[in-house]
Amino acid sequence: MTFDGDGTASGLPITTKLVSPTTRSDAEAGWPGAAGWPGAAGWPGAPGGPGAGPLPVEASGIVREFNSGHTTIQALKGIDLRILPGEFVALRGRSGSGKTTLMHILVGLDTPTRGQVTILGQALATMREAERARLRREQVGMLFQNAHLFPSLTALENVELPLRLARMAGRDRSARASAALAMVGLSARAHHRGLELSGGEQQRVALARALVHQPRFVVADEPTANLDTTTGQEITALLVNIAHSQQIGLLVATHDATIVAAADRVLSISDGQITDTTTRQR
Ligand SMILES: Nc1ncnc2c1ncn2[C@@H]1O[C@H](COP(=O)(O)OP(=O)(O)O)[C@@H](O)[C@H]1O
Ligand SMILES: [Mg+2]
């Protein structure tokens, strides 16, 4: 469900009512305990319950300026935020409000003009690029509007790629990738190639790939923008369940009212500033 502008989600049903993807078999409903996949109890942040452990991300005073010709565009004008383990935060704002710029900075793909970002207690500014890349590879997951699968690889092979990059041994790799595919309800499609999958299935593979290394912090940039309403709701349901059960801090930039309604907290961004924060009572 997409709509433009900063339209509000009021009046829409909240996700707990729309979740249960019907295409997922019960055997695959494995989260929080799909084979080979630790439940929430297996995560560093789990013992104290929700919210325990180091913060997945913390940012303060983030300013990002872009120089174009003789003018300077201030895309971010002093953003502060922190996301707790297991918290699903939606970032809502019009096109051009600064969502993608902020997400790139929060995962260390871009450097702020001013301000600090800390991922799991590690200040990005103090790290070399290679260390930031390693932190991303090990602790951060990313999901985009398009799935960006390798079309000639199978679903399983696509999901395994981050583990290959991390040089994990073959057997462990397939076990992990299979568990991640089960978590998104796609075990039955493991050996289908990227092009043989529907748009929603491709996005689920991309989600499995974003989660396969068991990151603590996940960003998703308009992950349902190219999906139909029902498929978008299924992806949203997966995101909610996974953030909560795996104690992942999740930030989702979106126009999608379903995602906004599902989030634990909604940040509204306008012209590079957070203008409103709504925390949902559960
Ligand atoms: N690399 C860049 N160079 C110059 N301006 C940029 C660059 N990236 C983003 N901007 C500008 O920053 C603002 C925010 O962009 P963006 O973060 O992509 O917004 P959103 O994701 O909310 O649509 C826009 O005005 C955009 O034109
Ligand atoms: Mg964007």
Image (spheres, rainbow, N blue to C red):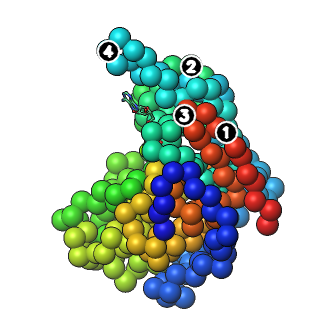
Amino acid carrying mark 4 in the image: Gly
Amino acid carrying mark 2 in the image: Arg
Q: Residues within 10 Å of mark 4 (few under 14, many from 20)?
A: few
Front-most of 81 and 275?
A: 275
Asked which secondary structure carries label 2, the reply is strand
Asked which secondary structure carries label 1, the reply is strand
| Disc with the residue nearer the chain's start (1 vs 2) | 2
Residue 49 coordinates in the image, percent (x, y): 79, 59
Pointer 3 residue: 271
Pointer 4 residue: 69
Q: Residue at x 21, y 64 (%)?
A: 151
Residue 171 visible, this orientation: no
Disc 3 to disc 2, C-alpha distance? 17 Å
Pointer 2 residue: 114
Give the answer, above or below, for where 47 lies relative to 79.
below
43 with respect to 50 (left or right): left
Q: Residue at x 40, y 79 (%)?
A: 187
Quadrant holding ligand 2?
top left
Q: Residue at x 57, y 67 (%)?
A: 258
Amino acid carrying mark 3 in the image: Asp
Residue 183 coordinates in the image, percent (x, y): 51, 73
| Disc with the residue nearer the chain's start (2 vs 4) | 4
